[in-house]
Image (cartoon, rainbow, N blue to C red):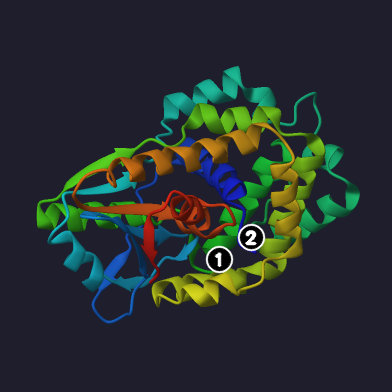
Amino acid sequence: MRIAATLVAILGFCAAAVSAAQTPPALDEIVVTAERAGPGMWHVHRGDANVWILGSISPLPRDITWRSKQVESVLESASQVLVQKPIEISIPRILWMLIADRKFLMVGGGKKLKDVLPPDLHARFAAQRSKVTDDADKWERYRPIIAAAFLQQAAFHQVNLSMRLDLGAALRVLAKKHGVRVEEIKVTGVSDMLEALKTMPAATERTCVEASLSTVESGLPRLVDRAQAWASGNVERIENTPELKEVDACRNALDAGKGAVDVIGRIRQTWLENIEKYLRSAGTTIAVVNLDLLLERGGLLDQLRAKGYEIDAP
């Protein structure tokens, strides 16, 4: 099993909100090199219509490199590159969130995280927090899933992992170099993430906090291994890397709910519609899509196969 894309989206949003509230960060740079095999591309085609899909993952090591040879070769005949429009979280937006939607981001009622998390989960949280900060009260005012996002971001930083590496940004640079048009696909926004947070049941939130803690406690080597497999183009290794059972439990809890599932469903449908749009006429397109959306059962690749498109795996 792979990381739940919904959880990644929500935690990524929370982590981005933190960074924006403190200091608006510049995206870390993905180094392009000709010395690595590089992530593979799926070739979806029908007749003279071709869409090459490059799967992206998060987090990635900050110093990771990947080879652009195949991408640059396809760019020579491509008409456009499709990338996800980044979620823009400005300081005014964060301030508005903290005022208008504070109850969905903070614990509230004069309570702290220790008052709303089961004692065993809070003890685990505190143990991991002590490894990344000397502040014993840090993140205590935030609701569990957001506090977990802060902790996870700090833990990633300690092992050189980053959720700010944007493969789409790297493709924008290469597309500009080749004079290829870039089209940004808006798949989700701040309001979508807030709605997911608003509608998330407390039991689901606790399950996903446990998944986050398990990731920090024992899952970081797996994430590094997964990233290296991506950089070397080893999709089979990614598919065969077992997921933590706690992350599977979080995914199942999210799938059983409403708000969060709606978000990932809209993301999947938006990508399907945009990819199909360019499969209806002759030409070549490159799309950068989250790898989990591609590989999950019933995901984008399965849906495109079901519609009769031919797909060549990397």
| Viewer-proximal residue among 212 and 147 | 212
Q: Residue at x 82, y 50 (%)?
A: 122
Residue 166 in view, yes or no: yes
> Dots 2 and 1: beta carbons under 8 Å?
yes
Look at the numbered disc 2 and give the secondary structure of its residue: helix
Quadrant of the rendering where the N terminus is positioned: bottom right
Residue 22 in view, yes or no: no
| Viewer-proximal residue among 313 and 7 | 313
Q: Residue at x 51, y 24 (%)?
A: 95
Q: Provide the residue designation for mark 2.
A: 132
Can you give x and y, in whole percent of width and height, for residue 178 in the image? Answer: 11, 57
Q: Provide the residue designation for mark 1.
A: 158
Q: CA distance from mark 2 to mark 1?
A: 8 Å
Image: 302 above or below 191: below
Q: Amino acid at mark 1?
A: Gln
Can you give x and y, in whole percent of width and height, for residue 192 in the image? Answer: 53, 30
Residue at the far top in the pictured view:
100
Q: Amino acid at mark 2?
A: Val
Can you give x and y, in whole percent of width and height, for residue 6 in the image? Answer: 59, 45
Residue at the far left in the pictured view:
179
Can you give x and y, in whole percent of width and height, for residue 203 in the image? Answer: 82, 40
Quadrant of the rendering where the C terminus is positioned: bottom left
Image: 77 above or below 251: below
Look at the numbered disc 1 and give the secondary structure of its residue: helix
Quadrant in the picture for residue 286: bottom left
Residue at the far right in the pictured view:
119
| Viewer-proximal residue among 118 and 233 | 233
Q: Earlier in the sequence, mark 2 or mark 1?
A: 2
**Mark 1 surroundings: few (<14), some (14-19) or many (≥20) residues within 10 A:** few
Image: 277 above or below 76: above
134 horizontally vs 12: left or right: right
Q: Which mark is residue 13?
A: none
